[in-house]
Image (cartoon, rainbow, N blue to C red):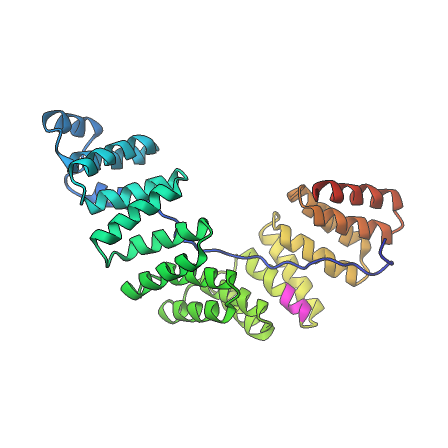
Amino acid sequence: MMKPGFLLTTLMLCFSICFACPASGQTIQQAKSNQRIGTMEDFDKTIQKNPKDTAAYFYRACLKANEDDLQGAIEDLNQAISISPRYVEALNFRGQLKADLGDNEGAILDYNRVIELVPNHSTAYANRAFLKEESGDKEGALEDYNKAIELDSTDLINYHNRAILKAKCDDLQGAIEDFNRVIAIDPSSTKAYFNRGTFKSYAGDYEGAIEDFNKAIELDPENSKCYSNRALLKDYSGDKKGAMEDYNKAIKLDPNNFTAYRNRCMLRHETGDLQGALEDISQAISLQPEDAESYLIRSQIRENAGDHEGAKQDLDKAHELDQ
């Protein structure tokens, strides 16, 4: 066991991701606003009269998707595309639905076809980028995000997503630059300040990170994660009192903030409050009972407090979960 007073673990930053997940809802809403949209029965009758009416299949697919019948919607889109293989809107929508059903490979094929037919279709590039990243093709995803942004430099979600991807590729400066662009266009984006602050902290720029979290809190004073992250950075910077105040605020705003409990536990332990540290890590475990490292932390705290049996039980549990 570790010597009393010393606790080894990893302090945690919360991390907010703003992905542009392929969303069928946008297409459905567009279809609903179209004057042709009607009831399911309307389109059943239209198709019965004219089985070649591609628009009727498309709009019926929209209604089916809106009722969570995604497979039925895909079947209607298959019909529309078989009649009109260059029906870009149907191909794009089918790609979105396939992605919703977890068929990334099929969705990518549909987006490939959309891009082949409409080379400046920025949304198809963006959605394909998302799916390529999910499939492990980070290089291809980055190329598609670059193209999507080249075609439409006003879509901020693409900057968000490209920044996250750059960070995963260890290009923290590139990620920060993307969030600089987002903030330049939309200075009220809490997510952009939050994420940029997170990446600045990873890059070791704690002062800049704290400034970003200050701004995020100014924009969204009820955001528990902002306080939790700022607390950690204040702790790193030596401001223990300010860190404790921010952890307390984070937990008050969100009693389920696992990260805040775990990090406050570390701060309490460091300042000699073993009972408070034990209470915090126990609460963290109740929130995420499968987190092996939390049991390891509690084991160390119990050992430091003289509870050798409890320490052994937690250590055994940590090893069991870490198998």
**Residue appearing at x 84%, y 56% in the figure:** 2
Residue 233 in the magenta stretch? The answer is yes
24 up-or-down from 233: above or below: above
Residue 186 vs residue 126, the one in the foreground:
126
Residue 234 in the magenta stretch? The answer is yes
Q: Give the percent coordinates (x, y) of residue 257.
A: 61, 51
Provide the residue span drawn in magenta: 232-236
Residue 100 vs residue 218, the one in the foreground:
100
Residue 19 vs residue 109, the one in the foreground:
109
User: In which image quadrant can residue 87 be found?
Assistant: top left
**Residue appearing at x 22%, y 46% in the figure:** 89
Residue 221 vs residue 309, the one in the foreground:
309
Q: Give the percent coordinates (x, y) of residue 279.
A: 75, 49
**Residue appearing at x 62%, y 53% in the figure:** 252
Q: Give the percent coordinates (x, y) of residue 119.
A: 23, 57
Quadrant containing the C terminus is: top right
Q: Give the percent coordinates (x, y) of residue 60.
A: 22, 33
Q: Is residue 104 left or right of residue 237?
A: left
9 up-or-down from 295: above or below: below
User: In which image quadrant can residue 5 be found?
Assistant: bottom right
Q: Is residue 245 left or right of residue 311?
A: left
